[in-house]
Image (spheres, helix red, strand yellow):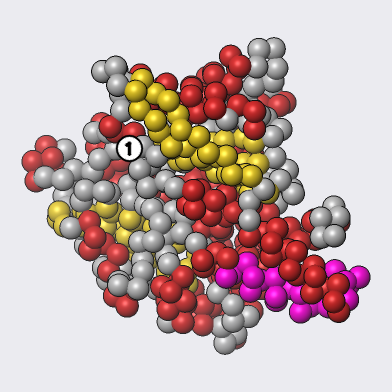
């Protein structure tokens, strides 16, 4: 993502212009430090690639491209998900690993950034074949993984089943060694944390809710007095009956939609949801619990025919999935894949608040265009950290063999996100930078300071 690189460089320039930042660095030394930081933050420490040799159930041998990119371990062990998707490539995984570094720094987590990927469509493989793919991934990348080295987690196309399989293989390869914290996002019986499956979706909604309800209500007068465009966008929508649309109804989108539906703090109507096949619409609000139950019973898919709707007593209009983004709604929650809003559709976006549940769902050009129009974009680096935050709790619980209740997990998740936003939002609403830029400045400041203290700029 060129946008990501641009924001990193802009953020570094901004903090280097502040003489209170690393005041020991002067003149040419300061310029050298800037160039060093650009290089360190722009490139990964390691890129690991392999072709997994798999024998399918029909006896055919296939070679499947796979990756593990380790961007930075400045703050702690590498941490990031493993994605199973046919669009996976080296650039995508590298950019996502870089985002993980910045995200963990923003939320004060003791992890660096990593990411993995396998170039497959999981639906085209049997359970036995997927099990073998998971085992092979651990075998091929065994030397670089471990509880204090690099700790993978689920991502698009993977879940607790795959993490259980991978942890089991890691245990087989390392008999007698610590293994429980080698992977997070596992099932409860295998040492996973309660609430981990819902964590990303809940975190996405918690972030939006805290900003538009808790923070706005506490700082209403200050926000009204500022000339900040985004502050006025937030104020205009606080207390209003909000029409919400959710793109993507997988593990992330369905949980976020359910949180919006059940929220007692904001007056939400979830009027539209979509998946890879269809978009469902109802002007008075959809029956989100009913749709969640349907998806649970139908391999994650939404109802796509009138027969499906009638059979399950669901009321909705069936529409083209791609129409959701351009609907007349107040809030868009993007919970699908990258680059969903781009130069060809950005001028048709009507929502004034966009929450990035997915990683990079808005291109650089569209991001700048929408920000200039006063659209309040809650960026991925801030909004979708719920998964890695609860992964951290799982990692800690596994080390201590002390486990929290689900309510405790969600309470701590909300408090963690609140702490981040209480740091970021006053600065954001007080200056002209979009929220994404503010988040990057905070992350880059922390990472740069630690790198300097560790002597990595010489």
Q: Is residue 182 left or right of residue 311?
A: right
Q: Secondary structure at mark 1?
A: loop
Give the farthest residue toward the right.
Answer: 24
Q: Residue at x 36, y 66 (%)?
A: 341
Q: Residue at x 35, y 61 (%)?
A: 340
- Residue 237 appears in the figure: no
Instruction: Point out residue 277 in the picture as x, y percentages from the top left corner.
Output: 21, 48
Closer to the camera in the image, 32 or 234: 32
Q: Residue at x 59, y 21 (%)?
A: 170
Q: Residues within 10 Å of mark 1 (few under 14, many from 20)?
A: few
Q: Is residue 25 magenta?
A: yes
Residue 270 image-quadrant placement: bottom left
Span shown in magenta = 6-26
- Residue 439 appears in the figure: yes
The image quadrant where one finds the C terminus is bottom right
Q: Is residue 111 above or below residue 209?
A: above
Closer to the camera in the image, 102 or 109: 102
Tag 1 residue:
121
Q: Residue at x 41, y 60 (%)?
A: 361
């Amino acid at each position: 993502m060129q946008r990501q690189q641009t924001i990193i460089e802009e953020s570094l320039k901004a903090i280097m212009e502040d003489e209170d930042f690393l005041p020991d660095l002067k003149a040419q030394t300061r310029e050298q430090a800037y160039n060093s930081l650009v290089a360190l933050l722009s490139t990964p420490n390691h890129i690991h690639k392999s072709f997994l040799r798999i024998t399918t159930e029909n006896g055919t041998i296939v070679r499947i491209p796979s990756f593990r990119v380790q961007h930075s371990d400045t703050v702690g062990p590498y941490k990031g998900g493993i994605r199973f998707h046919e669009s996976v490539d080296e650039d995508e995984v590298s950019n996502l690993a870089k985002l993980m570094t910045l995200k963990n720094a923003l939320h004060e987590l003791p992890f660096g950034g990593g990411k993995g990927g396998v170039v497959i469509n999981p639906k085209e493989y049997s359970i036995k074949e997927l099990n073998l793919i998971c085992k092979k991934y651990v075998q091929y990348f065994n030397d670089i993984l471990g509880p204090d080295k690099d700790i993978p987690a689920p991502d698009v196309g993977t879940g607790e089943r795959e993490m259980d399989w991978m942890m089991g293989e890691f245990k087989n390869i390392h008999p007698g060694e610590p293994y429980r914290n080698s992977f997070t996002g596992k099932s409860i019986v295998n040492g996973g944390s309660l609430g981990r499956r819902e964590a990303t979706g809940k975190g996405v909604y918690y972030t939006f809710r805290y900003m538009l309800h808790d923070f706005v209500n506490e700082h209403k007068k200050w926000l009204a007095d500022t000339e900040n465009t985004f502050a006025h966008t937030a104020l205009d929508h606080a207390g209003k009956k909000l029409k919400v649309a959710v793109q993507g109804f997988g593990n992330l989108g369905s949980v976020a939609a359910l949180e919006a539906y059940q929220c007692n703090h904001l007056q939400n109507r979830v009027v539209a949801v979509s998946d890879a096949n269809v978009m469902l619409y109802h002007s008075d609000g959809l029956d989100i619990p009913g749709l969640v139950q349907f998806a649970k019973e139908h391999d994650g898919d939404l109802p796509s025919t009138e027969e499906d709707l009638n059979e399950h007593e669901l009321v909705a209009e069936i529409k083209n999935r791609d129409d959701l983004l351009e609907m007349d709604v107040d809030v868009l929650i993007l919970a699908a894949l990258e680059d969903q809003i781009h130069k060809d559709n950005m001028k048709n976006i009507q929502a004034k608040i966009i929450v990035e549940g997915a990683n990079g769902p808005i291109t650089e050009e569209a991001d700048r265009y929408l920000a200039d129009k006063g659209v309040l974009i809650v960026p991925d680096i801030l909004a979708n950290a719920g998964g890695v935050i609860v992964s951290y709790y799982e990692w800690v619980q596994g080390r201590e063999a002390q486990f929290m209740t689900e309510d405790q997990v969600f309470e701590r998740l909300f408090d963690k996100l609140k702490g981040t936003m209480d740091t970021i939002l006053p600065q954001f609403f007080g200056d002209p930078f979009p929220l994404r830029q503010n988040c990057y400045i905070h992350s880059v400041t922390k990472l740069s300071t630690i790198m300097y203290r560790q002597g990595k700029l010489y």
